Amino acid sequence: MALYRAIFVLTLVAYVPRAIIADCSDEREDQVPHQEAKLHTDLLHSYNTEYRPVKDHKTPVTVKIRFALKYISFDSLEETFNVHSWVAMTWKDEYLNWDPSCYGNIKELQVESQSIWTPRMALFNADASVYQSDAIYTTCLVESDGSVTCVPHLTHSGICRTSLRSWPYDVQNCTFYFGSWMHTGEQVNFTFYKTRPIVMDDYQDGPGWKLLNVTNERLPGGYSCCPNSSYPMLKYTFMLKREAGGPAAIIVIPCIVIVLLTLISLILDVKDCTRLFLLCFSLFSHFTFLTEIGYDIPKHSSDTPIILLFVRDSILITLSAILLTLFLMSLRKRIVPAPRWLVSINRIISSGPGKYVVFTEFDPSESTDVKVLTDDNVGGSSGTDEKLRITADWIHFANILNSFVFIIVSIVYFILICVYIPYDD
């Protein structure tokens, strides 16, 4: 009896699932696909994605492009420019049209881009180190007249040669060239939307850069080698400006401080080592400054930043000021009579309008080579006076020379600042 019960249970377990599956299959067979599914099946039943969607092979497929910019990033060190955007593409597919009245008045249909023909728009000056496919993968909207619209989210990475002449207030122009690798303009014709080919409603600037302007231009792509074919390209030019608040604080301001340090040292007296110490410190600061900005400035550029030329010329001026200081120190120590031409120069400048130019005054009485008479050495007063007169001639000439050099250096620095110090427009 127990054996019969076990056989019955096993038979029941084996039969019930088959009965359920059979009932589900019958229900699915009874289901009629809705009009949208029927339309989708009819359109793609014999569709071929490998060929252009035209019935006459001489008819070009016109593809309209619109860029909706979202985000950009620019690496000036590697000279790579990245653009993140939604790219709207619209064209006419002659094999994807239907009569809406035959399909429940359906006028639009969503189709995966892998199931239909899509244009392959390639970036010609792309970064070769980053793989970028020209195929799109998204959901496209197909209208009853055959119009297809796809809006994929794409990231394009290209090469942008930097121009660092005005660094850190530089403005970069990065250009992208788009087109088709496989087809000529007579097969696939890329063009822009007539209205708003570039949309920046939701755009955000990347770190360290501000987008000033974007321009678009269609290049016909006619070449003498191929008079019967054209290769049109879409040209986008992005104008970027560096956010130079941080670099200016560590580059431009120290340059001005070093200039002031050199100029102030030229006013000091040369009787002690204070002036020489300040000039040596200024020269050391120049080299330290060059070392520091070497870590910040981009290494690759078609031209040299003009601020480096300013530091170069400032180093030469500071070195010349050190040599001048050593020469003036030697003049103060001379006790030989001054030549007549030197005394004549002193008298001409002292008696003429040039005396207003001589503003630095080195006191002859503080010369280390002239000793002040004591009460016990009255008899040598005439010799001491002669030494004071001789020393005064040399020191007066040193004053004239130092004032003249200070004026020249000030003018040279003014010209260098106007020419070589970049500024924010």
Image: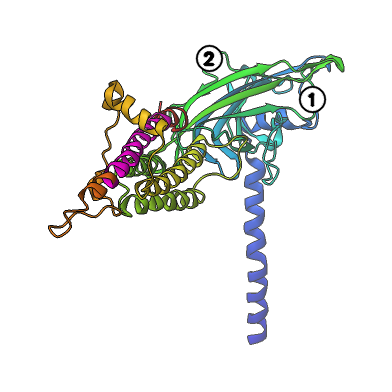
Q: Give the residues in magenta.
A: 387-413
Residue at x-position 40% and y-position 49%: 330
Which of the 4 image quarters holds residue 94? top right
Magenta segment: does it hold 395? yes
Disc ID at residue 183: 1
Closest to the observer, 150 or 292: 292
Closest to the observer, 233 or 20: 233
Check disc 2 and report its element: helix, strand or loop. loop
What predominant SS class does the magenta segment belong to?
Answer: helix
Residue 148 visible in rendering? no
Residue 163 visible in rendering? yes
Residue at x-position 84% and y-position 18%: 57
In the figure, 12 relative to 140: above or below? below
Q: Name the residue type under label 1.
A: His
The residue singled out by tag 2 in the image is 195
Check disc 1 and report its element: helix, strand or loop. loop
Residue 365 is left or right of residue 30, and the answer is left
Q: Name the residue type under label 2.
A: Thr
Residue 361 is left or right of residue 26, and the answer is left
In the figure, 13 relative to 315: above or below? below
Closest to the observer, 235 or 159: 159
Residue 422 in percent (x, y) is at 44, 32
Q: Earlier in the sequence, mark 1 or mark 2?
A: 1
Residue 425 in percent (x, y) is at 41, 25
Mark 1, other Cα within 10 Å: few <14 / some 14–19 / many ≥20 = some
Which of the 4 image quarters holds residue 260? top left
Closest to the observer, 216 or 8: 216
Q: What's the CA distance linking mark 1 and mark 2?
A: 26 Å
Residue at x-position 36% and y-position 54%: 277
Q: How many marks?
A: 2
